[in-house]
Amino acid sequence: MRFLHFPLFLLLSFLSFKTLSAQEIVFEVIITKPTTQLVDPKVYKTMENAVIELINTRRWTENEYLPEERIKCNIQINITKEQSETNFDAELTIQATRPVYGSNYETILLNHVDRDFNFSFEEARPLIYSENQFTDNLSHVLAFYVYLVLGLDNDSFSPFGGDAMFQKAQEIINVVPGSSPPRGWRANDGNRNRYWLAENIQSPRVRAFRKSYYDYHRLGLDVMHKDAIAGRTAISAALDEIEKVNVNYPSAPILIAFVNAKSQELADIFIQATSAEKLKVYRVLTKIDPSAAARIPELKR
């Protein structure tokens, strides 16, 4: 089990979500159907149950997690097009959180939209994930994000604690067929896909970000209940290091994912800070991702 125990308070929710309770992660999942629907609706119900079965019955790590230690994760699979009765284009939105020590607050670890997602699904065929061979894209995409979330959670509790989980995510990429692979697994599919998330999180150029990720959570957020100024100071120092990583690897997808997860949180943390402190946070976030400016205007005032 992990070395800290936290109560889980705030439940992030979507309407009509199905709950998945795995050994390490508690998922809530919704599958939304396209407006123009040709496939029998029961296919989506079967698909939802298959996803539940896949994650609920699998131990993803060898670690022991108490019920209150399990990571919360919301997944929404939005079917954008039915290519056929068994082939689908979709977007996957994933948000994972972990509790902050000494509070009823949960911080977002990952807030990401995967738009390069196409898969096949047949009612009569079980959804099976295999570590050693590529069985189907749906199970492998889900497994990739499970390991990514587990790695980020571990990194937030100990320096570079997510190494083994990130390696698992990389191994998933390695077994994807080289000939006509599904979208999102190769470097030339785009600059914010699964390939680049895995590349970033293991790149030497981004390693300092991972240490800062730990500092942000353990030395910053987790101490704010007893010393808000010390926590904010540690977070500010972590942002200084993240800014340096961005200079070395500008707008790396994992850095953009960090900004997506943390921009509103940082606005809330620094709203009572000095103008200089607020402007520094604004500068760091908008250098990484200029679109963040629209989400944090209060830091520019």
Image (cartoon, rainbow, N blue to C red):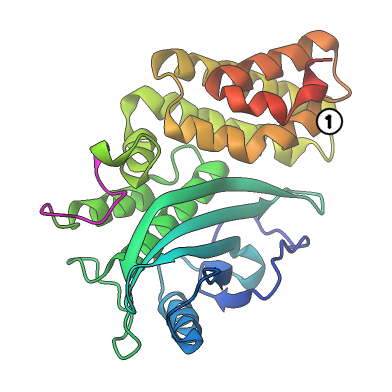
- Give me the residue at 24% from left, 37% from top: 188
Q: Nearer the viewer, residue 209 or 41?
A: 41
Vertical relation: 21 (above or below) 110: below
Helix, strand or loop for the magenta stretch, by majority = loop
Vertical relation: 147 (above or below) 279: below
Q: What kind of residue is marked 1?
A: Ala
Q: Is residue 3 visible?
A: no
- The answer to which image quadrant residue 35 occupies is bottom right
Q: Is residue 76 visible?
A: yes
Vertical relation: 50 (above or below) 78: below
Q: Nearer the viewer, residue 146 or 184?
A: 184
Is residue 149 located in the magenta-colored stretch of the structure? no
- Give me the residue at 47% from left, 18% from top: 246
- The answer to which image quadrant residue 19 occupies is bottom right
In this picture, residue 256 sits left or right of residue 99: left
Dot 1: what SS? helix
Q: Position of residue 136 (x, y in %)?
A: 26, 70
Where does the magenta region start and end? 178-187
- Give me the residue at 69% from left, 19% from top: 281
Q: How many badges with numbers are in the image?
A: 1
Q: Which residue is mark 1?
A: 228
Crowd around label 1: few <14 · some 14–19 · many ≥20 (10 Å): some
Q: Residue furthest left?
A: 179
Q: Position of residue 89 (x, y in %)?
A: 38, 62
Q: Position of residue 115 (x, y in %)?
A: 43, 50
Q: Position of residue 190 (x, y in %)?
A: 33, 37
- Give me the residue at 43% from left, 56% from top: 145
